[in-house]
Image (tube, coloured by chain):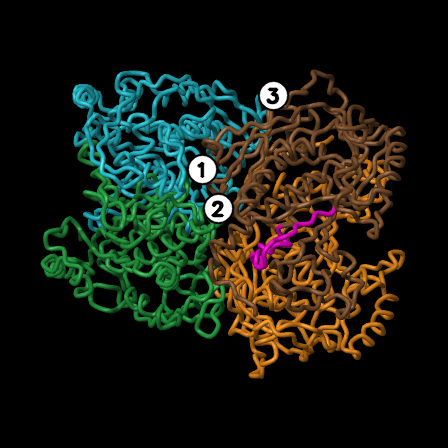
Chain colours: A cyan, B green, C orange, D brown
Amino acid sequence: MSLNTFGHIFRVTTWGESHGPALGATVDGVPPNVEITPEMLQVWLDKRKPGQNKFTTQRREPDEVEILSGVFEGKTTGTPVQLMIRNTDQRSKDYGDIVEKFRPGHADITYWQKYGIRDYRGGGRSSARETAARVAAGGLARAALDKLVPGIEIKGYMTQMGPHGIDRARFDWDQIDQNPFWTPDAVAADEWATYLDGLRKSGESVGAVIEVVARGVPAGLGAPIYGKLDTDLAAAMMSINAVKAVEIGEGMNAACLTGSANADEIYMGPNGPEYSSNHAGGILGGISTGQDVVVRFAVKPTSSILTTRKTITKAGEPAEIITKGRHDPCVGIRAVPVGEAMMACVILDHLLLHRGHVGENQGKIG
Amino acid sequence: MSLNTFGHIFRVTTWGESHGPALGATVDGVPPNVEITPEMLQVWLDKRKPGQNKFTTQRREPDEVEILSGVFEGKTTGTPVQLMIRNTDQRSKDYGDIVEKFRPGHADITYWQKYGIRDYRGGGRSSARETAARVAAGGLARAALDKLVPGIEIKGYMTQMGPHGIDRARFDWDQIDQNPFWTPDAVAADEWATYLDGLRKSGESVGAVIEVVARGVPAGLGAPIYGKLDTDLAAAMMSINAVKAVEIGEGMNAACLTGSANADEIYMGPNGPEYSSNHAGGILGGISTGQDVVVRFAVKPTSSILTTRKTITKAGEPAEIITKGRHDPCVGIRAVPVGEAMMACVILDHLLLHRGHVGENQGKIG
Amino acid sequence: MSLNTFGHIFRVTTWGESHGPALGATVDGVPPNVEITPEMLQVWLDKRKPGQNKFTTQRREPDEVEILSGVFEGKTTGTPVQLMIRNTDQRSKDYGDIVEKFRPGHADITYWQKYGIRDYRGGGRSSARETAARVAAGGLARAALDKLVPGIEIKGYMTQMGPHGIDRARFDWDQIDQNPFWTPDAVAADEWATYLDGLRKSGESVGAVIEVVARGVPAGLGAPIYGKLDTDLAAAMMSINAVKAVEIGEGMNAACLTGSANADEIYMGPNGPEYSSNHAGGILGGISTGQDVVVRFAVKPTSSILTTRKTITKAGEPAEIITKGRHDPCVGIRAVPVGEAMMACVILDHLLLHRGHVGENQGKIG
Amino acid sequence: MSLNTFGHIFRVTTWGESHGPALGATVDGVPPNVEITPEMLQVWLDKRKPGQNKFTTQRREPDEVEILSGVFEGKTTGTPVQLMIRNTDQRSKDYGDIVEKFRPGHADITYWQKYGIRDYRGGGRSSARETAARVAAGGLARAALDKLVPGIEIKGYMTQMGPHGIDRARFDWDQIDQNPFWTPDAVAADEWATYLDGLRKSGESVGAVIEVVARGVPAGLGAPIYGKLDTDLAAAMMSINAVKAVEIGEGMNAACLTGSANADEIYMGPNGPEYSSNHAGGILGGISTGQDVVVRFAVKPTSSILTTRKTITKAGEPAEIITKGRHDPCVGIRAVPVGEAMMACVILDHLLLHRGHVGENQGKIG
């Protein structure tokens, strides 16, 4: 089983390779009567699109999404929605070096060991290009959420590049869309620009931390024990290429806290329960509290760099390799819209699950 | 859908509440002809059992596991294995305080908001007591792994208590089973004993970091894209009570590294490919490399402390609460065998998946 | 994967063997706040219970069901419900004959060929005793349906025994519970009693046809394309031991009809659309119409008979076998409550699916 | 959840509407290294293709399949295979009549009642055109089976048209591909040609029975209890448009037999166990015996006929409707390759399941 599907009710199956004719997402479980157009999806794809500035790969593709099914007269019908993106930049080139050699830090060697065959062109199925399909599906999830729970807002941004974190005191929501790093800290944005330009010129790359927040999520979403909201978010984010860690709320730092410092106190607000703080990241016992749902994930530096690295060939011979070509010095940048898309899909999925299973039984407070 | 099942082929469904008559795990997809006895499972349950020393809850229960199905003459038959543990310490007591008030940091409020009904006794379904069922299932997974891939070793240990981490230079595998914290650093064990005793006496609690390693995992396990080995491990660990973060290999620190520092170089060893380092945590592209699979997770401090906390009642009135009773000053300790169990289940699940899907197609190197 | 679970949202996993300590059903996805007691489930188990008259197996077991989880103060909590039935009639006896020989028409040989191990006692997992767990789960489904869609009625009855069918002109709902065959035709009941008594005395057995009807099912249930209501009912009924065919509405006879004879015409009734006939069995395009949902299934004669049959041993040697012991001359009788239980589970499952996915979008007519 | 996926390991998700831009199948879990070309799939699509003779719909489309992913240099890579078929015959026409009126016997009314929106063009998602995607996926399954278990043969044929069944004494495998009805009885083929021509001219339609046989299936496939081979086949066949009944082996007739007449006796053949007869249809206890797997299903007459029928409009007003256009007088004809495709998918799925779960544990006989 290749398990190319995620979600319980809102189920997204992605397909396609980096250099095949097309890739896409088959999305099942879409609620009916949601207004959707290709243009509404394109907004999010454009945010992820490569080649927008010098900090992202220079592969130039329009990443134009086609809706092939499940939509009639501008509305979803409740049947599967097929979202297809043609690969247009399939340059005919010599792949000789990576045909026989495994690139360190890439999935070349494990795909070979697993399947005994691999599409080596641009990483094939293991390429981050697969995330374009997720972003398209995420756009559909956002549209459905807008209809079902108006007011949900999902926003991702970069909080750390290499060892350089943002200053939370300078956090500014309006800044996020104003810089190439989707960071809320304008000062950090400037500093990172210089830092990353240096790395880029030296053929190096660096990791990053992305935070994604969902505001306006109603209390009660999440399906304990093995479909907890945080469990599904952890899986969703870890499934993104190059991600090595996922944190909810306080994250790794929770280990350092005492019980009295960590547990968010509860009080009654005008519209229901509120909390004195949000160490929990909006989730208790796997179920949303109504606070902001806060997820962070760490993206490793891309392994495609201009440094000579030691490796082996399929024949087991020692070799050296330099990964030439068009690459991202910080793939974390383009992971921002992907993280948002995964958040949107997971929240919608749990909303649909909750409606089906629990219905009108929710407990009232006050 | 409550989603109380995990796994794709080796499927574990846990059931039961903290203070109901029993809890257990219904385990489907167990390979046939695996030798198993209750005693083999009991070893792992005893490791998790409460009341073993002053650092864990004083609830005293034998946690004795019964095998009710799926085993015939000491061997699994390939049919579902029912593992049941009776709750014996169901003291008749006054639950008055937590019936009406929500404990901060606990799932009381969200279960109420989700379901409109909750078994408040000891946290009901959200109690960490549910993890006993996982440990039993994990024992079964270990037995199956022993038969199918002899030599796999799975070991968990604590690497941080509160802000105090171990010194990796003192790492000693043989030390792990020699101290109440399952830590490989004997010096840290002594320091933590003093530290935790102080916290315990003051009615406080603290978080921890657990690391789980699987050695001898063959290359090729993991089902991209949405059943990656790291994805499933992230979900498995995040589903454990009180876990707030999961790291694979370098984890959050991957964000700080450059591409040349992070990507593990490859060379040919006597039995196949080897790597100069293991920043990847034994997983590339979601597929095992044959190196140690390394997962870490952070456990928040238990929210059951002897400090007065602000909260509200079901009626929405402000209130104060102190959580009396038997609790763990550092629940991370008892999370060690749980993390091991989840690792065993995930590895076995992917082994079975791989056998079915890929069969004999794996690529050879050298 | 043994696949011992059915249902999408209301998920029933059965476990246990004929002669093990217990068997049961782990039921996940139960809506919260449904009133349930063991007594409410026992009603249905008693209907299936063996040894009630001379026409069913003389194995005598109380089949008493225990609720081990998921219910608090008489109501479901939305967490998994564990329903356990102890096996009390595990006579210590000599199984010698069936240890080495495969009984014709039984699963002995295929379980051996599949698993390389089998619990031969009473058929082990392949025994129809497993259906007791389904009946318990079905009772839970009925209770949930009663709460969510008051007025749904689910009724099964026998329409054919051996070659002898009922006369539909004598169909009388009130008769169904008045005879040991659950048949609506009192005349047939008398005739069958004589017929079956003859078969029983000669050590023979015979097949039967069971019809199950669900009344009051709202229009709109069913999830095309691969979770159609009829698809799921076909799977549910075919999964019952000894079932060899499933029909919806007109069934096999649909092949004989012309288009004008078959398609039910539509007119407007006082409460919505009605139909001139019900060849469709209440389902169009996999979705319920609001008419009676009508399913029929054929049960083969039990293969446990007092006639000498030719077979082979595990060693491949030719052999003869007579299946002694306590058996049903017409297992179809006890399949009636099982068919009802499966219908209840499928209808509830689709109701929950529909609520989650479609919500308030249904189209109105008139 | 729309549940547009079937299969456990070999998972087929179909998408697309009758008159949208395209339809297709997203196939996950395909074993790697299977040789496949579009031409190999086209063979089966051509068998189902409309407009081949006067007995099938005159809609003329090439139904050309494109492979968009998962295949590299002519072999599957183990990643999802996207099979797309463009809809080329989307005539711009007036759908006025069926926009407001519900066609009796069609899914028009239930799709409306369920979703509150429907793509009425040609039946939209409920059109039998969806089965083209199944046939493409079935071609892929056949190729994988050919590699994994050489010698499996899957063949479908018509055994009854309207009330006219074949004479089994005239059964001739070589005849099946020689007539437009895929029937093994040449005499019946001639008689049916006359019979159907008469129905066609009068604007009528008629039902049919299709039988599908799989030869060479190894013993041991099937996953009790709820993934029995017969259970999954029942679901697979019932999910085909217009199917109203499914039989395994003896089918409905099993109800008429006595135990001694029904149970197939076992003897030892040169290559393993053999049976004196095949009432079981090659399946015992849900697991294949090694005999021919035999499934039959009844297809109702298409409801698109040239007779005036009574119905209602969306507004609930009484109306009359005649379904003009291009239709099949006996849709059963084109259901033959669809039934074969479903058989191929189910057998492959269970082969992969069996390999993963049971591995080398099968019991030997003799």
- Give me the residue at 39% from left, 31% from top: A124
Q: Is mark 1 on a helix, strand or loop?
A: loop
- Circle 2 residue: A362
Q: How far apart are marks 1 and 2 (CA)?
A: 47 Å
Which span of residues is magenta-colored? D211-232
**Disc 1 sits on a residue from what chain?**
D
Have a look at marks 3 and 2 and say if they share a chain.
yes
Left or right for A241, reference C362: left
In the image, residue D212 lies in the stretch drawn in magenta: yes
Q: Quadrant of residue D161?
A: top right
Label 2 neighbourhood size at 10 Å, few (<14), some (14-19), many (20+)? many
Labelled disc at residue A73: 3
Q: In this view, does B305 lie above or below C180?
A: above
Label 3 vs 2, first from the N-terminus: 3
Q: How far apart are marks 1 and 3 (CA)?
A: 37 Å
Which residue is at the far bottom?
A: C93
**What type is the residue that disc 3 sits on?**
Glu
- The quadrant the C terminus of chain C occupies is top right
- Circle 1 residue: D77
How far from the left and from the top, in percent, is residue D14?
A: 58, 35
**What type is the residue that disc 1 sits on?**
Thr
